[in-house]
Amino acid sequence: MAKYKIAWLPGDGVGNDVMECARLVLDNLGLDAEYIHGDIGWEFWKSEGDALPERTVNMMKDTDCALFGAITSKPKEEAETELNPELQGKDLVYFSPIVRMRQAFNLHTNLRPCKAYPGNPLNLKEGIDITIFRENTEGMYGGVEFFPIPEAVFNVLDENHPKMGKFRKFGLENIALSTRIMTTQGCESIVRAAFEYAKKFGKKSVTVVDKPNVLRETGGLMIRTARKVAKEYPGIELWETNIDAQCMWLVKNPDQYEVLVAENMFGDILSDLAAQLIGGLGFACSANMGDDYGVFEPTHGSAPKYHGIYKVNPMAMILTVKMMLDWLGEKAMADKLENTVMEVIAEGKVKTYDMGGSDSSLDVTNAIIAKF
């Protein structure tokens, strides 16, 4: 029997290509694992009205973790038009599979390291080594939205908030509402994870990023909670910044920041910006982690026009594999993989199109494997 059972979720487009690269790496590293395929992606939305079928969720419950490729997502109206004809008009609503997985498995912590590996010509600046902690189940991406807004919901808001009434003149059928729901528990969990990481790896500061001067209640909750948690870590400074200013400062002085922590949407924004500082989404790996399960994914999209031609940079997926190995406790194997990736980048002989080269995803993967 294999030591690990890993849910294998290629998804859409180039997710399939980079997952093929991941499997080559894992097989050559010799990880003792069984890989169990799961149905997920746009084809299942079109044919079944569910991009993450329940059978896949049930399969995942019997695995140690999941490795995920990429997903296609489209706006509500466009998604409905792509349903098979027999499914249209049945009030089916597309919901992001990755968001659903985060909530179904309580994957409360999204971890996104952004590290400038020496020799990468796309680095904005050498020495960048930022780790972003993003709360993964609440905030702006909590999934509680309305359009049109139901009268009962509007009336409750109108009764409790003096500014709500001014919107009634537009007609409830013309009002869309997205909520930003945050809890003390969610804020404390993600902030504590950031401080624990800083403590473990000798980081001197944790920067909490929000917008409490405008989002007074939710942003205020995050800042107050961060200050409370920070008192338990006297050797680590707490820095507080607004999301807009932080984006500017990341571009200006990225090497000054070590650990950033934010709610769901702001963490999403920060992590893509930080990824560009160290080469773009071709190097952007991530982990969605709960107390006893993890889903690991590169942060790039499905890029369907490149599907099957092995054009995209597989480094994000391969570094995601490294994160999965760390989570499984296979530290020696994880370190070996990262060191090999660093060596290939430093040599600069094999490069995909985003790095100014013409090598394929498989060329890069094979160059890494050749150094094991």
Image (spheres, grey):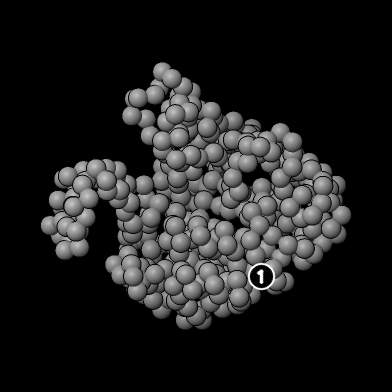
128 to the left or right of 241 = right
Q: How many numbered circles does the render carry?
A: 1
Measured as percent of width and height from the top left, residue 26 is found at 72, 42
Indicate whether 85 appears above or below 296: above
Residue at 74% from the left image edge and 36% from the top image edge: 309
- Figure quadrant of residue 274: bottom right
Q: Is residue 117 visible?
A: yes
Measured as percent of width and height from the top left, residue 197 is found at 54, 67
Residue at 63% from the left image edge and 37% from the top image edge: 304
Q: Secondary structure at mark 1?
A: loop
Q: Is residue 225 visible?
A: no
267 to the left or right of 187 = right
Measured as percent of width and height from the top left, residue 38 is found at 55, 31
> Hey, which residue is sitting farthest left in the picture?
159
Q: Please name the amino acid that badge 1 sits on.
A: Ile
Measured as percent of width and height from the top left, residue 215 is found at 33, 67
Which one is in front, 115 or 213? 213
> Hey, which residue is sitting farthest top in the picture?
86
254 to the left or right of 337 = left
Which one is in front, 98 or 45? 45
Q: Quadrant of the N terminus?
A: top right
Residue at 64% from the left image edge and 50% from the top image edge: 320
Residue at 45% from the left image edge and 35% from the top image edge: 78
Tag 1 residue = 128
96 to the left or right of 64 = left
Q: Residues within 10 Å of mark 1 (few under 14, many from 20)?
A: many
Indicate whether 136 appears above or below 198: above
